[in-house]
Structures are given as C-alpha cells and as structure tokens.
Amino acid sequence: MSHDEVVLLDAWGSMFGMRAWIALEEKGVKYEHKMEDLNNKSSLLMQMNPIYKQIPVLIHNGKPISESAIIVQYIYEVWNDNKAPILPSDPYERAQARFWVDYIDKKVYPAWNKMWLSKGEEEHEAGKKELISVFKQLEETLGDKTFYGGDTFGFVDIALITFYSWFYIFETYGNFEMEGECPKLVVWAKRCIQRETVSKVLPDEKSCMMQLWK
C-alpha cells in the first residue's frame, strides 16, 4: 500500500485524535496530519464527517473513516502486517480489548464532564468519586501486566494513554493525586510514554491545562 493517500483530520490536545495518530505511528504509515480549528471547522471536515462534524477523521484514498476507536481498528485491519499488532489474533482476547475500549469511551470522559460541569460541591464530589472509581477499575484490569495486551502495546493502551496528558487537569480540578489513587496505572502510563510513537504525540500536561482555560 505504498501509494496510499492518508490524511488525518485532528485537533490539538484531543485524546481521541491522538489515538489515530499513535496507531498510524505504530504501523509506520505515511500520512498528512491536518489540525482543525474546532471554532472554525474546515469545509473538508464538514464534507468528510457530515453526520457529527467532529474530529478525528481518517481519509484513506479519499474515503473517510470517523470515530477514534473505529479508526484505530481500521488502521489495524488495512495495515495488518507483523509490525505493531494493535489487536490480538485470538478472537476472545480481541473481543475483550474491544470491551475495555468501549468501557473507556463510556466512562472516562463522561465522569470527567460530570466533575468539570458540576454545579455544587456535592455534585463535584460525586463526579470526582466516579472518575477515580473508573480509573481504579482500569488499574485492576491491568493487574501486573506490562500493557493491557500483556507484553504487547495494543488497542486498550492506545485508547487510554491519550488521557495521560489530562491527568494533571483531573488532579487539579478534582484535588486528588492519580499516583496516590492508582499507582500501577501511573507506572503503566510512564512505561507507555517511553515509546517514541507515544511521546511524540502526547502534549505536555500543563499545556493541556492552559488550553482548557482559554
């Protein structure tokens, strides 16, 4: 597929866009990376994702693929060589990986939103407890493994590591420490960012805080 034309429509600091970015880097795919201004969306984005009008969008030979988890799986299926097997070969393990990515998508950002948009101390505390509970569950699922896929950095790792840049925001706004609440998860995250495919993608956590307050 050396003649493929691949374009990624993304936005700075998006944990969802970064998933597609990391997956492309893991597979060694050549691509053009276009950053969107979400306050002034391009006609290309509107054309390529007319339903949700959101990033990320992967454009492969003129055909758009939307939604970050779907994009990562598409990248795995299209560039399915022996390099960086994003999804397990075993059907059961593959199903489990998809389950946990779905859990991340349904739990992490909504719990953060609940805390971020809270209208009182009680609501804020409830959102904070929910967010910590979600991360504790993910830490329990990781167990003593190197990565969620065992020794292999894969789908669940890609889906979750992009939230690492937001840990500082979660801690600051929630007044807690991730390392104190979920020490194994923090060790896992630091292990992930030792990978060049991750470190080159994730922004500095304090830069994310500044962007949030703009």
Image (spheres, grey):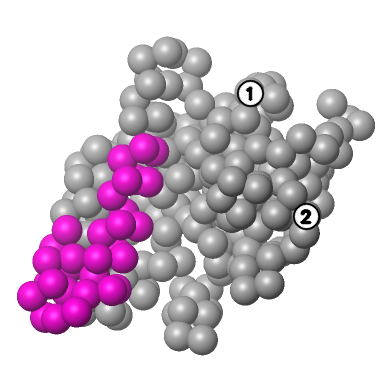
- The range drawn in magenta is 101-130
Residue 61 is drawn in which quadrant?
top right
Residue at the spot x=26%, y=59% of the render? Answer: 111
* Eye-nearest disc, 1 or 2: 2
Residue at the spot x=78%, y=47% of the render? Answer: 7
Image height of 21 relative to 77, above or below: below
Looking at the image, which is closer to me, 109 or 3? Answer: 109
Question: Is 99 a magenta residue?
Answer: no
Percent from the top left, x then y, of residue 110?
A: 30, 57
Image height of 211 relative to 105, above or below: below
Percent from the top left, x then y, of residue 127?
A: 18, 65
Question: In the displayed structure, does residue 25 sit left or right of residue 165?
Answer: right
Can the viewer see residue 9?
A: yes
Residue 101 is marked as: none
Residue at the spot x=36%, y=15% of the render? Answer: 92
Residue 44 is marked as: 2
Residue occupied by mark 1: 77
